[in-house]
Image (cartoon, rainbow, N blue to C red):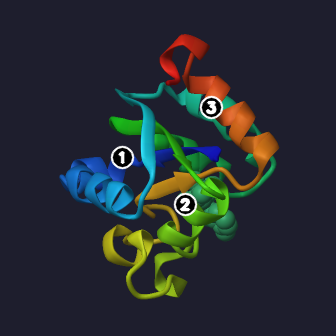
Amino acid sequence: MQRTFAIIKPDAVRKQAAGQILARIEGAGFAVRALRMIHMSKPEAEGFYHVHRDKPFFGGLTDFMSSGPCIVMCLEAPDAIRQWRDLMGATDPAKAAPGTLRKDFGASIDNNATHGSDAPETAAFELGYFFRGMELR
Ligand code: CMP
């Protein structure tokens, strides 16, 4: 078993797609080990995405991620990091395969509905950024 960190982003929460996305997550066999709805401040979003701080999209990304509530989660499954990235699809919804969450719920590379960790070290940092040990079951 492996754990990964996932976000249902503000665009998907705003369009009331969170329930459908959660159903797809559970339907794909993930166990939800922790879940919380939060509204990140701009500095909190900047801390979370610090690896992207030198990218041209950093300002827009952190404005967007602090623009409304999102749902942060710990998901567990065999090979969870890869499996969750497969279920999300490509970062840009226009390039995402049919049947993926970003294809179905994303509108653009900025408003792409979901986030997932890309490696075990990233998952450890991202889970620890939002969850205390006693919240993870
Ligand atoms: P996410 O998986 O949350 O990781 C960083 C986010 O930056 C990414 O999804 C996109 O929503 C956003 N982003 C905006 N522009 C780009 C880009 N050119 N390349 C990668 N990510 C981008």
Relative to the observer, which residue lies in front, 25 or 117? 25
92 displayed left or right of 52: left
Q: Mark 1 and mark 3 in contact (Cβ < 8 Å)?
A: no
Disc on the earlier residue, 1 or 2: 1
Q: Residues within 10 Å of mark 1 (few under 14, many from 20)?
A: many
Q: Tags 1 and 2 in contact by the CB under 8 Å rule?
A: no
Which residue occupies the foreground of this view, 28 or 51? 28
Q: Nearer the viewer, residue 69 or 18?
A: 18
Q: Where 80 sits versus 32, above or below?
A: below
**Number of marks:** 3
Mark 2 or mark 3, earlier in chain: 2
Location of mark 2 (residue): 84
Circle 3 residues within 10 Å: few <14, some 14–19, many ≥20: many
Most extreme residue toward the left is 16
* Residue 137, above or below 108: above
Identify the image quadrant of residue 57: bottom right
Residue drawn at (46%, 56%), measured in percent from left and top? 114
Residue labelled with disc 1: 10
Q: Secondary structure at mark 1?
A: helix
Q: Which residue is mark 3?
A: 127
